[in-house]
Every structure is written in structure tokens, then in C-alpha cells.
Amino acid sequence: MPSSFHPAGSAGISRAAGIWLLLAALLWISPAPVAYSAPVGGGWTRAAGIHAAEHFVGQYTDSRGQAAYCTDFERMSPEQSTGYDGGHTGAFVRSDGSALTAAENAALSYLLHRWGATADNATAASVQLAVWALTSPGMAWDSAGMDSILRTEKLPAAVVEKARSMTETAFNGAGPYTVDISLEAPASDGTVTAVVGVLAGNGQPAAGLAAAAALNGPFALAERSAATWTSAGDRHRLSLQRTGLGSGSLKVTVPRTPAAGVTWLLPESSNVQRLLVAAVVEPRSAAAAITDLPAFQPAVTTRTSAARTDAGTEVHDVLSVSIAPPADGGSAAPAPWLSVPGSGAPVSLEVVSTLWGPLDAKPVLQDAVPEGTPSVGSVSTRVDGPGTYSTEGLVVPEPGWYVWTESIAAASAHPAEAADYVLDWQGKFGIVEETTFVPWAPGIRTELSAHEALVGEQVTDAVTGTGFGPSAAPAGGTVTLSMYGPLAAPPSLQESVPADAPLHSEVTVAAANGTLSSEPFAAFALPGCYTVVATYPGDELSDPYASAFGEPSETVCVEAASSAESDSAAAAVPVPPAAPVAGAPVAGAPVSHASAARAELAQTGARLEVAAGAALVLLGTGLACLRRRV
């Protein structure tokens, strides 16, 4: 600061005053640019700064350590004042009566707030130069007045350059200030990142301002995020960890932002420089609501363990659990599977799988289960995130179609407080991949119309079908009755037909549930035993069937006829067999051995072997009978 100042063209001072000023100048100016502490008028002491060629350029402090800077370079230094008043606050007015603009007041306030309390000599000198450039008439940067001072004082170039930079920064970083908070999308673990900007009047981040964060709700700052910080030239990032379920808020406060005004002290002497002591500050803050976690929509696709199986076996369902996309079909990513805040454990849900059936027809895809649909039962599977799971098994008891459906109730969530964050889900009915078919297993019981007969006679078969599916008879399926013989003796029971068993004849009946009578088998030409095997090839809905070989109910033994009967048989004229009548109802008692039966044989037609057999009997070369006829 100048030790004294006399405006150009003023009258000379008295000799005594000149001597006093000379002595003062000798005391104030040091040959080296270092700080000098000594009491000055009004209780202020020189503090950090530089003794330049002719003036002290720096700050003053009072007994409380408050720093101050001179404002009016053309006036005398504070030492010329006996004291200062209590202070004034507001927009600053230069000594020539020109008021600082709002931007200049804001920049001056920023300058004092950010660097005014420095204890560094060079920095304090730079602050003082920047203050004079803003507050002293004719001292703006690059003005003739400022250029003259710089030439006279011979301050270090770095000090001057820093003062220029401070001034520019003060204008760019000045208020009015705003606090801006933006929240990024929560991470998979629920952590929320807040990006905080303390913005200057130009909308750019302002540096050097102390800020503090406060959280409400189930959140805490991560270890790497401090609750207080000093703003910098870029935005500050805070990591907020969720500690529970629910919403919350983040409030960021900058308690002291420099406003467009300063506080200064007025000396008792009007020709002494005023002192700037502080920036006018005001708090700025902003709050951001942290929304609750979104509810997520679980979904399940399933595949039954067997598309086709047998009655009495167990089936289960394979669950593929996922997260459903947004219901509105938008491009937004679905909400993630919820994890319990704090522990990080995923929320578990119960998938209820119901097996419906038996159904008489293949189920049709639809949203809901038709009313009255029978069910086998339900099983529950607890799931804790996307993945593949298997249900417990259920036994399919009888033929028909079975289909699984799945549902998830939000109320099944563990922990229970997570239920509000889960959306219910219900699968459709009749999905092909969830359908199991159990084919019908036909059963066939047969009984020949006679178990004893004579050569030349015929028998029929009574066929009782059970367990045929709904498609067997309408599709024209038939049961084939194959008679094997003659055999030398009644056959023993066997699973399959022996390779050397001769086929006598075949007839068919419709494949249906209930009892039907077959057409007659071909007449017996030779004595011996004959047995019938019933077979069904199966169809789309029913399994194949084959009866055993040698069933007693399907076996008949045939004897040679007596002489009179042989004559009658020889006299018979062979005629082509009559057209078969499939599926005739059972008619009456077994075939008789009387001549009336042979009349029936003549009506139905006899095969050539009947005549041949009769001839053999007449020639006495017939096979031995199994029993004698009286």
C-alpha cells in the first residue's frame, strides 16, 4: 500500500510533514520483498505481502486475525488513520463515486472469499493488486494507472501474472451460485451415484467452495465418499449405498457462497484508504429425491419332463426363471431382480406349479384355466433369481393330456417386506412345452364260442375291449384275431407266437371299448388244437396290444367226425366263403356238433381243406382224436 499519496497539482506539504513522511517511508520500505509485521493505525498490523520498491503490497490483520486489503490506491495508507468504524456491507462504490457493477461486486466478493485469508506473501500481494484493479479509479488492468504502478513497484512477474489470473477466475467463478444434483441409475446392488455441481453465475462449476451432504432415508455414504468437500473445476461424485427399502433424499449445502457484495471499514480520516475485510456470503443448497426401488416382474417359461409317458409314472416341470420386460413394450431395461439392501441377498419367491388333467383332448392355449378343469395337484419351488429350477414330481394316474401352469404371488417374497417390490405373475394354460400326454393302454379279453369242435365246424370269438382311446374306433382301427393250428396238443402259455406255429385263419373286429363278436374263423379241416392271438397295432393315442399265445379261453381242440358225419361232409358241395360281417354282436350258445351246425357250415361256405379232411377220414387216415365221440 502507498505510505502516503498526494494527488497531482496539490499544494506542497509543510516541511515538518515532509520530514515525517520521509521517516515513515524509510521505516516502511524494506529492500527485500518479504512480509513485515508491525502495528499500524487503528490496531491493524501488516501481515502477508511484499514490500515493493515504494509501497507495501499485501494484507493487514487485526488482533483477531481478520485479514483486510486496501481499496483506494490514490489515498494514504491505513497508518495515517487513527481508527476505523464498525464496517459497512453491500455493493462497493469507488472513491470517485462510480459504483461497481453487479459482476464486479460478485468478482470482488469471490476474490476475497477464496484467497483473502492466505498467509502466503506472494498470494497476498496478488490479491491486493487484483483488489486495486477492481476498486481504485484508473487502476483497471492494462490501464495507464496500473501500468505506472507496476513499473514503479517492480513486483515479481509471477505475482503480477497471478493477480491477473485471480481477477479472471473471479469473474468466471463469481455467483450467483446454484447447487445442481443429478442422480444416475441405481447399480445392480442398489448403489446410487449422485453428481453434484456447485455452479457459478455462468453455469460452470465453481472451485474453492466448501460443500456438505446430508442423507435422509435408508441410505449412507459409501466409505470412499466424504460428507464434506471443497468444490473444484468439475462436478463432484457421491456414492450412496442403500441400507434398506424405501425412498430417501440427498441435500447438498454450500453454507458460504460469495454474494455480490463486500464488507469494508471506513477510516476516520477521509484521505486514508478504506479496508476490505470480507466477502458477503450466503448459503446455497439443493435437494434431490431418491426414489424407491422399482418393482420387478418375474416370469417363468417351463418345459415338462416328458412329452409322452405311461400312466402311473411321475413327471415334473423344468422352470426357466427370468425378469419380464416392461409391460408397455418400451425400450427401457427391466427392473433388476431385487436384492435385500445391506446383505445383498436376493429376494426369494415361490413358484406354484399346478398339473391339470387328465383331459380328454389336447389343451388349447388360453390365458386362464377353464372352469371345472380337473387337477392332479400342485407343488411349490422357491427361486432366488434368474436360472433353471426343477419342481417336485407328480404322478399322472391315467391316460389323457396333462398340462402345467405356474404362478408367482408377491406375497410369497422373503423377506416379507420385499413383497411391495414384486409384481404378481400368472402363466398361460395349454402351452405345448408344458403338456404331457399319457396314451391309452388297450386291454383285450377274448373267449372262443367253443373249446371243443369237430372237423368241419367253425367257431367265433367274443372280444371285450377296454382302455381304447377316443381316436381308436372313429379312425377305423381294428383288432386282428389270428388262429394258429392245428397243433398236436393244447399249447402252453407263451408271450409270443412260436415261429413254427401254422396260421389257420384271421378275422378282425373294430377296436372299441365294449364286447363284439367276430365273424367265424375258417372251418377246421384237420383234427388238433387251435389257439387265437389278439393284436392291436396301436395308434396316435393308444399303445399297441398283443395277447399271449396259448390262452385257455382262446384255445379249441378239434376231433375227427364220425362215419355218418363224414359222409355228410363228403356230400357237401364246396362254395366260396360268404362275405365277413365285422363286429357282429355275440349270438347265442357255442356251436353244436349236430347236423344243424353242418348245415350252417354249408351256408357259410367251407374251405377246400374241409373236403380234403373229410376224404382223409373216409380213407381211415385221420389223426388220432383227443377224445372219442359217443
Image: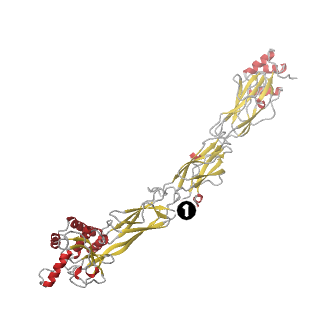
Circle 1 residue: 420
Relative height, residue 465 to residue 346 (above, below) = above
Depth check: 291 or 9 in front? 9
Give the number of marks: 1
The image quadrant of residue 604 is top right
| Residue type, numbered disc 1 | Asp
Image location (x, y in percent) of residue 492: 76, 26
Give the position of the N terminus as an image quadrant: bottom left
Residue 503 visible within the image: yes
Q: Is residue 71 left or right of residue 514?
A: left
Q: What is the image's colouring?
A: secondary structure
Relative height, residue 270 to residue 188 (above, below) = below
Image location (x, y in percent) of residue 226: 42, 64
Secondary structure, mark 1, is helix
Residue 602 visible within the image: no
Q: Is residue 222 left or right of residue 612?
A: left
- Point 77% across, 19% down: residue: 613
Depth check: 28 or 481 in front? 28
Depth check: 192 or 130 in front? 130
Image location (x, y in percent) of residue 393: 64, 46
Q: Residues within 10 Å of mark 1 (few under 14, many from 20)?
A: some
Image location (x, y in percent) of residue 213: 42, 67
The image quadrant of residue 62 is bottom left
Q: Is residue 365 left or right of residue 478?
A: left
Task: Return the residue found at the far right.
Answer: 630
Relative height, residue 585 to residue 325 (above, below) = above
Give the position of the C terminus as an image quadrant: top right
Depth check: 605 or 434 in front? 434
